[in-house]
């Protein structure tokens, strides 16, 4: 629940109604209010949505805590150093996470509402009708509607799963006690991040997935990350089928089939990270004549319009580009289009993405396979981090950089980075691809020495020369 007061609560006519009070909902409401519109922002449950409450913020602070534990133990990679750290109080760690979440929810959501006179916050379960929105039994008269109800963890179709207790990415970060062993089902970014986090804080972790880790990443990136997780004690099992799951001897046991053999894996707790489901249930979407896409999300065009005139949708509820910054971006476009004539198009061509493992994985643009599927004749360059001076100085050469370019024009098409500072380096490639740089352009650009981002320059130079034969800062 929101602990703020509803403003302008006697109004019942609005230029725009926004259903959902998470990142997308707030982005749409603030954008519309700045346009001078009267906005009904309708929330249900905890204000702030997934990112601040149960997603990005809590997971990333726990991941950073695990990195601190790991870094102490890894200090011996420098001659003359020794270190050790461990979790002294899991409860204190969880409490600190909760305090951060509460602080950011208050400052970035609740406290913002009084700053915008055009926003009326309403609490309740909204439902679409033929003429608008019904909330708590009352009709909300509105000119336009934006649906921004987000998503929830999805459950895979594994026989027996409904009969055993299992954790989501939300409940795993609410455990009062750290599990002794954990079985993580799903090798996407959430599974990889949380598997490493729990392993670094002392839990015995097994990570299983039907395909490979990070199936959307370049194969070189996924293979390297798999090795690094295994080096830290995570048992990674890929390319398997789930047979069934059950309680057994006080543990939860998952039977799998891999390479023609049947095997059972067990753990104290099981964490399911196999994707998210758009929150459309109970909204009356199909009854209102709004089409759903094949993955269950609300279908929208490039102007964020649904199939029903005057109704828009943005964020995870559309089932695409499920990142908080893309939700905010899409919601802003939806609000501007709803109020000003649908002139703005959604463009995710240079959308960056990050996986907060260590090393971090980050990417933008097309993969090699993706570019070829679109008809490009490609060329690639892979630079290992043992060629990057920053990594050598840090005595941590885990990682690589892969660039994809159009062979005919030399124009950069995509990039992926696996490096300790990969998340902070990818934005350079966002700009390079957005503004049509070639590999020669990037290779000739001046980069600061002893930085991870300098590896992009080396990778670009690698299209035409052996960077191992260059002196420091050469080229």
Image (spheres, grey):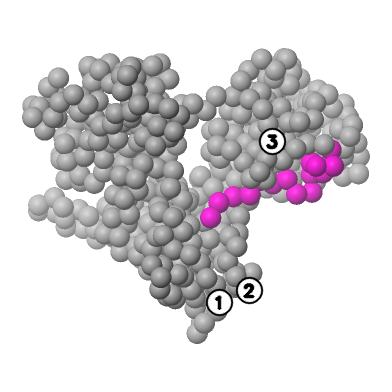
Q: Give the range drawn in magenta.
A: 274-288
- CB contact under 8 Å: marks 2 and 1: yes
Relative image position of residue 100 (x, y in whole percent): 51, 47
In the picture, measured across the screen, residue 185 lies left or right of residue 392, that is: right
Q: Which residue is drawn at 31% across and 50% down?
A: 223
In the picture, measured across the screen, residue 202 lies left or right of residue 33, that is: left
Disc marking residue 71: none
Relative image position of residue 406 (x, y in whole percent): 34, 23
Q: Name the residue under label 3.
A: 299
Q: Residue at x 46, y 59 (%)?
A: 210
Q: Is the magenta stretch mostly helix, strand or loop?
A: loop
In the picture, measured across the screen, residue 438 lies left or right of residue 53, that is: left
Relative image position of residue 462 (x, y in whole percent): 20, 28
In the foreground, 378 or 416: 378
Quarter-of-image position of residue 374: top left
In the foreground, 11 or 395: 395
Element on which disc 3 rests: loop
Can residue 105 be seen here? The reply is yes
Q: Mark 1 points at which residue?
A: 246
In the foreground, 434 or 218: 218
Can residue 63 be seen here? The reply is no
Q: Is residue 340 above or below residue 191?
A: above
Element on which disc 1 rests: strand
Q: Name the residue under label 2.
A: 163
Quarter-of-image position of residue 409: top left
User: Sequence-wise, which precedes: disc 3 or disc 2?
Assistant: 2
């Amino acid at each position: 629940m929101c602990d703020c007061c509803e403003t302008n609560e006697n109004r019942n006519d609005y230029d725009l109604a926004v259903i959902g009070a998470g990142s997308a909902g707030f982005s749409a409401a603030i954008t519309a209010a700045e346009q001078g519109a009267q906005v009904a922002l309708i929330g249900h449950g905890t204000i702030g949505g997934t990112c601040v409450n149960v997603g990005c913020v809590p997971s990333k602070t726990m991941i950073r805590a695990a990195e601190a534990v790991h870094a102490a133990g890894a200090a011996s990679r420098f001659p003359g150093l020794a270190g050790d750290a461990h979790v002294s109080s899991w409860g204190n760690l969880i409490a600190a996470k909760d305090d951060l979440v509460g602080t950011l929810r208050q400052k970035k959501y609740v406290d913002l509402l009084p700053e915008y006179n055009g926003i009326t916050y309403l609490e309740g379960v909204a439902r679409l009708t033929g003429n608008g929105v019904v909330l708590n039994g009352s009709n909300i008269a509105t000119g336009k509607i934006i649906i921004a109800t987000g998503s929830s963890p999805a459950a895979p179709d594994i026989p027996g799963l409904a009969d055993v207790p299992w954790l989501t990415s939300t409940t795993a970060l609410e455990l009062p006690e750290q599990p002794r062993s954990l079985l993580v089902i799903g090798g996407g970014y959430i599974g990889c991040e949380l598997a490493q986090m729990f392993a670094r804080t002392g839990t015995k972790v097994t990570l299983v997935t039907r395909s490979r880790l990070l199936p959307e990443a370049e194969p070189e990136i996924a293979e390297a990350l798999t090795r690094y997780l295994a080096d830290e004690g995570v048992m990674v099992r890929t390319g398997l089928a789930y047979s069934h799951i059950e309680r057994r001897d006080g543990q939860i046991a998952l039977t799998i089939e891999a390479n023609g053999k049947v095997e059972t894996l067990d753990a104290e707790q099981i964490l399911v990270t196999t994707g998210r489901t758009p929150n459309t249930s109970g909204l009356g979407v199909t009854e209102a004549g709004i089409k759903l896409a094949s993955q269950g999300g609300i279908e929208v065009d490039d102007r964020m319009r649904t199939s029903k005139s005057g109704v828009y949708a943005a964020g995870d509820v559309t089932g695409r580009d499920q990142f908080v910054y893309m939700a905010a971006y899409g919601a802003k476009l939806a609000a501007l289009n709803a109020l000003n004539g649908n002139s703005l198009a959604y463009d995710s061509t240079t959308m960056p993405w990050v996986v907060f493992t260590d090393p971090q994985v980050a990417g933008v643009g097309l993969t090699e396979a993706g570019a070829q599927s679109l008809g490009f004749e490609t060329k690639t360059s892979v630079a290992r981090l043992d060629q990057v001076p920053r990594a050598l100085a840090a005595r941590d050469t885990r990682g690589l950089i892969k660039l994809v370019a159009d062979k005919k024009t030399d124009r950069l098409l995509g990039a992926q980075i696996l490096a300790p500072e990969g998340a902070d380096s990818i934005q350079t490639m966002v700009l390079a691809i957005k503004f049509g740089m070639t590999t020669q352009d990037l290779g000739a650009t001046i980069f600061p020495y002893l930085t991870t981002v300098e590896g992009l320059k080396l990778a670009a130079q690698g299209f035409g020369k052996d960077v191992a034969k260059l002196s420091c800062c050469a080229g």
